[in-house]
């Protein structure tokens, strides 16, 4: 039976119009380092977004569905791009300014960006790449920076402010299908080429509603948001669109991401909530220690992107009265996957196990754990499986490039369309997710998972072990088995039997490694993680001296 | 350009599965008047919902799209119907037990309900209607009540508990289109036949997300909800679906809606939020005055359905520390239309003008004010217009009955598909709605509105006026002009010129009534409202003694 409800699409245009009309007096404040910050009301942002759309359409010829690249810090202009580009029917393509040059070029070429909007301070990064960016015809520059770097670059160069000046503050926004692409964001894939996730108007709208829900970030018109997480990282976790929808004022840090200016902007603009990776908060905590500031305005700090040390959470809470909330997600999940609020009725002192977990899924994120043999793993809080998710803001494919269709690699999507997150973990009967391993680091032994991280943690608890890495190696009978690579403390002598006996008291017998090797140090990647790929290669190449126990 | 996101429908099924799995330990507590309340976990509710779906499908033959009527109080069984019936692809039809018998019969026949699930206590209401309900084949009875009233009624009679007992706690829920109807609710139209609004899975899902947003009811898994507003009134304002989605426990008052049991259940089950019309809260306040109770558990009380006296709001806040929040909506708006939170930065003592207004629209509710001539009225806080709304949970038509298509009467929907609310009011530049009149009570004079309510309020401020009603009467030149019907206080003598002069100091000159009449009392409707229809008829029939001033 048909419903009688209106058929109204969920679009970024609605977020733009709502924020700039109903919450027209809310403010976007962009930090400028020195002097007064740049302040604009949501009404002004709305008018400037319309002017930007006019400029892109009429001056630069941007067409429906075309990608428009941004290489921008978190600032008011980037927010205008966030609103204008999708609303005019084009696709905002946020470029990650931290990527290696080759990856950045690859991505611009893959998306076939014809227009790039860039902060002047990032021209030293962009200009050298331009000869290799065949599709780029227009560069729009905003903010301070040396324009002469673009001399002779071949593209037409525009000044952002001059481009939008004098253009109408209203735009006849097109009617959009909510399933059209709105924003394109590439994963900085550690293996293989980067992969583009094309968020839809629908996914962004629904995700914004979820960010604003009481169980998630709870952003309302009475809040001021400080998004430290970059706007090129999964839409700054969706917070700018969500804040504009809620009418929450926004403090944009621009390129001032160091502890001192962050503390300054918190003290002066007084955000109530903030979002960033743990290292930012670690730095801020040290800064506040060195130079106390009034940061009592902050009620909640959201942390994601990496596991958050409980000590950091406790210190923020005890010293500054700021509650730190842990969340998990990835580019493919928009990114809100889980958020760690404790259940009802649990007193604060008992809440830590819940708060340091990845947390619970919202209704729009369906989750299941899959065993190596493809079977379902129960939500018992102990059996591990690879996390697969489904939902209206979860990717179901990757962007295929200018001509190509979306593509769905088998290692990323299941046959029935769920996203394979590549993370391995457990879920409790009441829905709390704890991630333990990346799937590629887990040992698939006889249809069961063995957690390499757990084995490592236990081994490193042995008084004579300095470091330990465990990797999967091929095994005729079991498919894979663990190889334990151990670094001993100075003066210690190796005794694999004793180490295995130590482990046997702590983990299940069938998980105990047979293969052991002594190494001088665990090889590390450029960001300091265990380089397990290298260890596996060394084993395959016979470069390790392996002892096999019975 | 296509997005790469998964195409996952927004359905009540997802709410059911999420609540009963991720929030399986949350509780539904139904008040039973005497003895222990009935408690079930969300997991049990999920299992019983599946069992109910099996019973309806396999035993009663309920088909996809078929309406299933409920004549139930707010209780756990009604929640099971809320979840099971839409999830199995049928349409939950909530019957308003307060309607006159003829209207109730008309509605059951119009919807062609074949199954009615009824509380035993309501059999005295239902049984006498059954001979006139041709479509009804099955009556499912739950809770105490005299079953013998159904003897010889012609329909098959089932016991709810016996019907679901022993059936599987899992159901192979069908894949649904999110635009299919999920719930059917008729307006208790004061004019003409009742009209059915068929909410979709999509509209209920989106509305639930909005109810749970920080700017609206902010329901999370740490809350316990007390929905006093009946589940046959626009889905109890959408709160049961929203609470199940958020994992918030629910206290169901069943038929115990009197101040004393309400105070008891608040004290014993400790809800954190509650929703009801003002009269309920007025009664509760008096009850707490007479017999103090610990109601500190309540953080927010949501009021709608009628304007809320500020004195009531203040008293709750000052005496009990409970914040009362005002909301506006109607059956056709699911019902969340606006909600009155003050803007950021306004101190409590200055917040009252915002808090007693109807409030602000969420992003999913677009609003505009229309002048009598069809033109747009500016959001200036003073110019009035008829409120028209648009959005994904706003009705765009009415249900046409078993065979018919949805229909769209011209007086309810605009040509471009917006809902005409029939309410007249103003909107401030920052989006605060204040409703002043029903459109049918407003005077359309020369292309402008004159508010009858404002004229009445001003007139009643005159020391010699006991009561006053203002109605529109036809006028050759202006289309309509106000007629002021005045009731004087004892001993006062009439002086229309003086009354007009009094008004002239308070309202715009062009709004001043020319036509005046003295009446012994303002005629009232059965619910105590001014009966303006009767006054207009008396004027048309020449029954009033009218003086016309120059």
Image (cartoon, coloured by chain):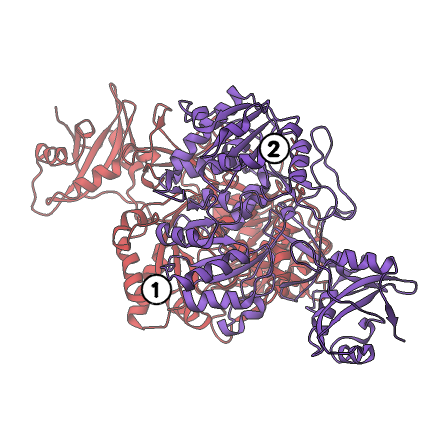
Chain colours: A purple, B red
- Which quadrant is the N terminus of chain A positioned in? top right
Mark 2 belongs to which subunit?
A
Quadrant location of residue A474?
bottom right
Question: Alpha-carbon distance for marks 1 and 2?
Answer: 72 Å
**Residue placed most toward the observer, B210 or B179:** B210
Residue B184 showing in the rendered view = no
Q: Position of residue A220 (x, y in %)?
A: 43, 50
- Which quadrant is the C terminus of chain A positioned in? bottom right
The disc at residue B284 is 1
**Residue placed most toward the observer, B300 or B539:** B300
Give the farthest residue toward the right.
A476
Q: How many marks?
A: 2
Left or right: B534 with respect to A247? left
Left or right: A294 with respect to B255? left
Which residue is painted at 51% across and 20% down in the image?
A59
Mark 1: secondary structure: helix
**Residue placed most toward the observer, B74 or A176:** A176
Given this view, does label 1 or label 2 mark the residue nearer the observer? 2
Which residue is painted at 12% across and 35% down in the image?
B505
Q: Which residue is mark 2?
A: A128
Quadrant location of residue A70?
top right
Q: With respect to residue A520, does A67 lie above or below?
A: above
Q: Tell me, yes or no, whether dots 1 and 2 are on the same chain.
A: no
Q: With respect to residue A345, does A366 lie above or below?
A: above
Give the farthest residue toward the front.
A491
Left or right: B393 with respect to B443? right
């Amino acid at each position: 039976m048909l419903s009688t409800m209106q058929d109204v699409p969920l679009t970024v245009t609605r977020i733009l119009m709502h924020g700039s009309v109903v919450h027209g007096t809310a403010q976007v404040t962009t930090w400028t380092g020195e002097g007064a910050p740049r302040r604009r009301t949501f009404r002004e942002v709305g008018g400037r977004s319309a002017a930007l759309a006019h400029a892109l359409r009429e001056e630069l010829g941007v067409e429906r569905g075309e990608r428009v690249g941004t290489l921008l810090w978190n600032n008011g202009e980037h927010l205008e791009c966030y609103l204008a580009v999708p609303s005019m029917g084009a696709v905002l393509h946020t470029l990650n300014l931290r990527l290696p040059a080759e990856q950045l070029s690859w991505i611009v070429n893959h998306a076939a960006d014809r227009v790039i909007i860039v902060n002047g301070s990032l021209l030293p990064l962009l200009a050298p790449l331009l000869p290799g960016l065949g599709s780029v015809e227009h560069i729009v520059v905003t903010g301070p920076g040396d324009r002469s770097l673009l001399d002779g670059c071949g593209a037409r160069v525009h000044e952002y402010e001059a481009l939008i000046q004098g253009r109408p503050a209203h735009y006849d926004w097109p009617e959009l299908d909510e399933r059209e692409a709105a924003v394109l964001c590439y994963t900085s894939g550690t293996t293989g080429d980067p992969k583009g996730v094309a968020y839809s108007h629908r996914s962004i709208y629904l995700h914004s509603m979820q960010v604003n829900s009481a169980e998630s970030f709870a952003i309302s018109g009475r809040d001021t948001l400080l998004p430290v997480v970059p706007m090129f990282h999964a839409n700054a976790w969706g917070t700018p669109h969500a804040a504009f929808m809620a009418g929450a004022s926004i403090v944009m840090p621009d390129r001032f991401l160091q502890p001192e200016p962050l503390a300054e902007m918190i003290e002066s603009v007084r955000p109530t909530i903030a979002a960033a990776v743990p290292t930012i908060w670690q730095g801020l905590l040290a800064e506040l220690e060195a130079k106390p500031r009034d940061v009592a305005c902050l009620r909640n700090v959201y942390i994601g992107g990496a596991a958050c040390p409980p000590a950091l959470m406790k210190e923020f809470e005890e010293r500054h009265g700021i509650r730190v909330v842990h969340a998990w997600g990835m580019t493919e999940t928009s990114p809100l996957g889980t958020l760690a609020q404790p259940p009802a009725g649990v007193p604060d002192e008992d809440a830590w196990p819940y708060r340091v977990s990845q947390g619970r899924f919202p209704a729009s994120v369906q989750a299941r754990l899959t065993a190596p043999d493809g079977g379902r793993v129960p939500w018992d809080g102990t059996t591990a499986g690879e996390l697969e998710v489904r939902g209206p803001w979860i990717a179901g494919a990757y962007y295929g490039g200018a001509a190509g269709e979306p593509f769905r690699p088998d290692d990323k999507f299941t046959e029935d369309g769920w996203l394979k997150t590549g993370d391995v973990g457990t879920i409790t009967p009441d829905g709390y997710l704890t991630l333990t391993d990346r799937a590629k680091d887990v040992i698939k032994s006889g249809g069961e998972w063995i957690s390499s991280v757990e084995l490592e943690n236990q081994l490193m608890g042995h008084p004579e072990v300095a470091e330990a890495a465990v990797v999967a190696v091929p095994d005729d009978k079991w498919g894979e088995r663990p190889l334990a690579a151990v670094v001993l403390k100075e003066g210690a002598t190796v005794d694999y039997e004793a180490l295995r006996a130590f482990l046997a008291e702590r983990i299940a017998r069938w998980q105990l490694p047979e293969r052991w090797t002594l190494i001088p140090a665990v090889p590390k990647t450029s960001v300091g993680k265990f380089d397990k790929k290298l260890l596996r290669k060394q084993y395959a190449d016979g470069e390790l001296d392996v002892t096999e126990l019975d």
